Amino acid sequence: MAVTMHDVAQRAGVSIKTVSNVVNGYPYIRAATKERVEAAIDELGYRVNMSARNLRTRRTGLITLAVPELSLPYFAELADAVISAADAAGWTVLIEQTSASRERETEVLSGRRRHLTDGLIFSPLALGPDDIGLFSVDFPLVILGERVFGAPADHVTMNNVAAAKAATLHLASLGRRRIAVIGAHAGEQVGSAALRTEGYREGLAEAGLPFDPELVGEAGLWHRSTGAETMSRMLDDGVELDAVFALNDALALGALHALHAHRIDVPGQVALIGFDDVDDARYSVPALSSVDPGRDQIAHTAVELLLERIAASGDPAPFRRVVPDSRIVGRESTGEPGDVVGVQPGGTEQVAVDMTWA
Amino acid sequence: MAVTMHDVAQRAGVSIKTVSNVVNGYPYIRAATKERVEAAIDELGYRVNMSARNLRTRRTGLITLAVPELSLPYFAELADAVISAADAAGWTVLIEQTSASRERETEVLSGRRRHLTDGLIFSPLALGPDDIGLFSVDFPLVILGERVFGAPADHVTMNNVAAAKAATLHLASLGRRRIAVIGAHAGEQVGSAALRTEGYREGLAEAGLPFDPELVGEAGLWHRSTGAETMSRMLDDGVELDAVFALNDALALGALHALHAHRIDVPGQVALIGFDDVDDARYSVPALSSVDPGRDQIAHTAVELLLERIAASGDPAPFRRVVPDSRIVGRESTGEPGDVVGVQPGGTEQVAVDMTWA
DNA sequence: CGGTGGTTCTACAACGTTGCACACTAGCGG
DNA sequence: CCGCTAGTGTGCAACGTTGTAGAACCACCG
């Protein structure tokens, strides 16, 4: 049924191995031979059988990207960027959705699908520092996000604290004194919520503004709906505020909805800034100011680090932590035209871990 | 290095084939033997080598979903739904982004990656009826969308004309007389734009409203930016209108932005409805009315049809065309609370094609 | 006691490819 | 004319799994 190298070899009058050599670009082949083989390939419509090649070479040419959900724009855009970056390097990406459940995130690290691909780029949302043992794996792994630090793996993250501080200071620089935050997670010590809230407090302090617990809006899930609910609750409770820092754009867009429903003008009465700079931000009404954490660079770097690990399989090279530059993008919701109004530099750090690579 | 069935067999004191049988759930195995094998598997941390299994069984357990771009929310949500549906059936999805380019769409049908998976769910945006030859392929294929009809493959589509007509009639039922459309493609005979514009004209006719070319806004790409530009242009040109039907939600959200910039109240002065019912629609300001084309059902059906084809590989079963029910969802942008205000039924059609299945 | 049928396990030969080692040719310097 | 190198092509043996066929064993029936 399917055409194999054997068929091609027969038709071109050469050995199977020569066909293999042609297909793989082995240099020492006479031009005439190469042409004959290529002609036979075209005529028969031959395609390499990936399963056989993968079995023989112990490589699949695939990498996995594990994210909570594609219907969250931040992750959809991240996936887009990762797929494009991998594609440019000749690799193919398989996406796993974890729904941010512990069970599924654990499965990503050890489940049946693990062996389908040569490496994993993983953005955990349920697993945390207590699960760090799970991340000591014997395959190339790049961790994304703010939940797991110090695992024996490369890590691409963002400068959450600095960027959140800059966002808060930006609101203060506009003359706002009652700056609320939306999306906090009470009592959490790790993760984006904790880090960004920390940045918020640092920003307040530097601006000489008091921290007021009343201005902290909790929201476990960072969805538009929870952003709207939290904002509504604060407004209904009569909290006085003249600016809002939402810990991501979905929350911000939800909050915007609620502000509108309460007939509050943005940015006239309340200035609003989000975090992530998803595509939507540009087109909301009014356009949403946001923090661009360097998503494209994150995707690009993650793929690059992973492919390096795969290529160097076995080398106990030191693990790296990379933090891209982030930017404050000012748009209508803070009364600006849509420019980058601030940059927080990132950097790269070598993390020597005395753990060898399998 | 890696643990194989051979190692497990040795440890459990059975043959390799018995390990294989245990792993694959073959029933005639003594409980004691099975336990011994399973213990050995656990102790050694054995995982089946997919490449070898795939080579032997001529199946990969993977299917491809080819869409233009994940950063377009409609496709991100479609991908989410397809991955979930496939996952529930034990299959894994590989996503290809085509950027809606002819070259990449052609490659999806015949490129090097084709052989990585057992079947393809393909939503073409560049290829059209003239390329129908390309769709006569010898592998399981399910086509999505409105660009290619009559190809020898299963097809899941939407009732574009009926739904667009219903959306237009809905605007008319609110008393609007000058209903504009945004996103038309002049001169095109196929694709979503042509079908939805056709539905728009039918709706006008049924409502007894005249068709006015001035009310037709062209927009090649269906992005927020083009929606905003087109809407702005029409308003700047002084076109009189009291309602807008945008051919997708991205256009609608862009148009909303432009309407706001022109200080036009929605829905007070202009009622607005989109198409696709993406998640965003619920959270714009004001919330956007839209047409839900049955996205979940589309994803679910596409996976189901594809897996059936894969299972029945070789059978020349008649091809099917499936059209899910679509719904008009009325929200604030048409002055409604957020309910389904109309359903257009779909259906299934058997398409006998005298072409056998490879 | 032979035959029958179900159960449990195994040996062997693929699946289609590539790594390795090697054979052969031609050219060239010594 | 020998030995060496560079260029060109081949045969063989894996890679780790499963399909096929059948061996061995155990009741149980007539």
Image: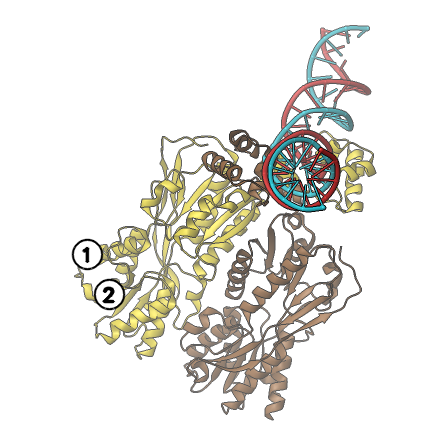
Chain colours: A yellow, B brown, C red, D cyan
Separation of disc 2 and disc 1 at Cα?
12 Å
Q: Nearer the viewer, residue A318 or A67?
A: A67
* Local crowd size for mark 2, using a 10 Å CA cut-off: few (<14), some (14–19), many (≥20): many
Q: Residues within 10 Å of mark 1 (few under 14, many from 20)?
A: some
- The quarter of the picture where residue D23 lies is top right
For the question of whether residue B123 can be seen, the reply is no
Callout 1: SS: helix
Tell which circle, 2 or 1, labels the residue nearer the N-terminal end. 2
Amino acid under disc 2: Ile
Q: Amino acid at mark 1?
A: Ala
Disc tally is: 2
Q: Which residue is mark 1?
A: A205
Measured along the vertical axis of the image, is residue B198 above or below residue D3?
A: below
Expressed as whole percent of the image width and height from the top left, the position of residue A73 reads 45, 61
Circle on res. B138: none
> Residue at coordinates 77% horizontally, 37% vertically from top-left?
A6
Residue at image x 61%, y 36%? Answer: B17
Q: Nearer the viewer, residue D14 or B262?
A: D14
Q: Is residue A39 visible?
A: yes
Give the residue at mark 2. A179
In percent of width and height, residue A176 lies at 23, 67
